[in-house]
Amino acid sequence: MDDVNRDFSGWLRSPGHKAWLAQEGDRLLMFAKAARLSQGFGNLDDHGRLAADAVAETMNTARMTHSFAMAHINGIPGCAALVDHGIAALSGPLRDAEHGGWFDKPLEHSADKGKAAYLHAFVALAASSAVVARRPGAQALLEQAIHVITTRFWSEEEGAMRESFDRDWSQEEHYRGANSNMHSTEAFLALADVTGDARWLDRALSIVERVIHQHAAGNQHQVIEHFTLQWQPVRDYNVDKPDDGFRPYGTTPGHAFEWARLVLHLEAARRKAGLDAPAWLLEDARGLFENACRFGWDVDGAPGIVYTLDWENRPVVRHRLHWTHAEAAAAAAALLQRTHEQGYEDWYRTFWEFNETLFIDRENGSWRHELNPQNQPSADIWPGKPDLYHAYQATLLPVLPLEQSLATALSNRS
């Protein structure tokens, strides 16, 4: 990028801060290792323990596989076997050998047995990272994931991902979601790196143009989450279930931060590949970040970012979730890399100070996953500590270049 190598002072260039990020990443990995189950990875409680009846979940298994693959690439001993375990689970008990694709849990534990784009994006991400880590079975898993995404979920006509199907792919859900398309964008950036196929960058741009440039930009850069099959916003979706963990009512500032970072990764990746990178990518990333801060941070008398807002940008669910604040720090780091502007440095420090003070659990390990509106530990939306992915990535993103997906960037740095 035109000014990416220009010197600037700040935490991103500080040896002390880089060492702190690495130490925090190692601490997160040590806690997460206990999530291993015979059929994948499960949910840990506040103390890092699995319940007696814990069941492997595809989302956790894929995210853990991706994270441990990055750790292995980064030279952290003890992670290779965990990557291999994740590959085996995703290639075996979590995969539908009859109809293709992946369940949310092993078949005998899966309630609806449906196939969700959200989960398949994470399987593709995990497989791509495992390929970069050069683990056995990773390439075959990657090819399976690409085949299912290409033949079942990707809609060339829409330039976006379909949402979900029943087990045999005969019935499609009458819904389009920003969240699944966001994580598909993340996966597509990784697929472009590991396959060398620039079509994945074109597909990512198509998603971003629809969800962000067409819809979010016209909504004060607040991400519209729920749509009909014709991509018309459904503004009352889950109004009676506003704190849903994946499809909450209203807008979600945390997703605006996450999108802002992905938009900048896409811009950098397309430039690196010699492809057109529209000027609106940076403009939209700025808008997403700025309005997420404006409407989400410190808006109800206490510091922190609220979970959701209504259509007038008023807080609805005022809990603070750890993933939101991890993504806020990562987005600030990406914008700081891209622009070198002091305002993003200030936000970056603000978010990490908040995370260290309130989310990072030095006594029991990992991060508290949720705080209530008074910033006290809570378990209303996300009980326990099942998630490694968001916090661990937040320790890696600030020290890696924007133009490559995380696993590839780590590999090239090694």
Image: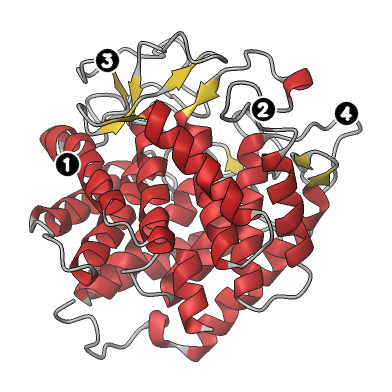
Whether residue 382 is visible, yes or no, is yes
Earlier sequence position, callout 1 versus callout 3: 1
User: For mark 1, does the 10 Å Cα neighbourhood hold few (<14), some (14 to 19), or many (20 or more) residues?
Assistant: many
Q: Amino acid at mark 3?
A: Leu
User: For mark 4, does the 10 Å Cα neighbourhood hold few (<14), some (14 to 19), or many (20 or more) residues?
Assistant: few
Earlier sequence position, callout 1 versus callout 4: 4
Q: Quadrant of residue 216?
A: top left
Q: Which residue is mark 4?
A: 53
Q: Amino acid at mark 2?
A: Ala
Earlier sequence position, callout 3 versus callout 2: 2
Q: Is residue 291 left or right of residue 325?
A: left
Earlier sequence position, callout 3 versus callout 4: 4
Q: Nearer the viewer, residue 7 or 232?
A: 232
Question: What percent of the width, then of the height, locates residue 307?
Answer: 44, 36
Q: Nearer the viewer, mark 4 or mark 2?
A: 2
Which element type, helix, strand or loop, lies under badge 4? loop
Q: Which mark is residue 209?
A: 1
Q: Which mark is residue 229?
A: 3
Whether residue 294 is visible, yes or no, is no
Q: Nearer the viewer, residue 74 or 285?
A: 74
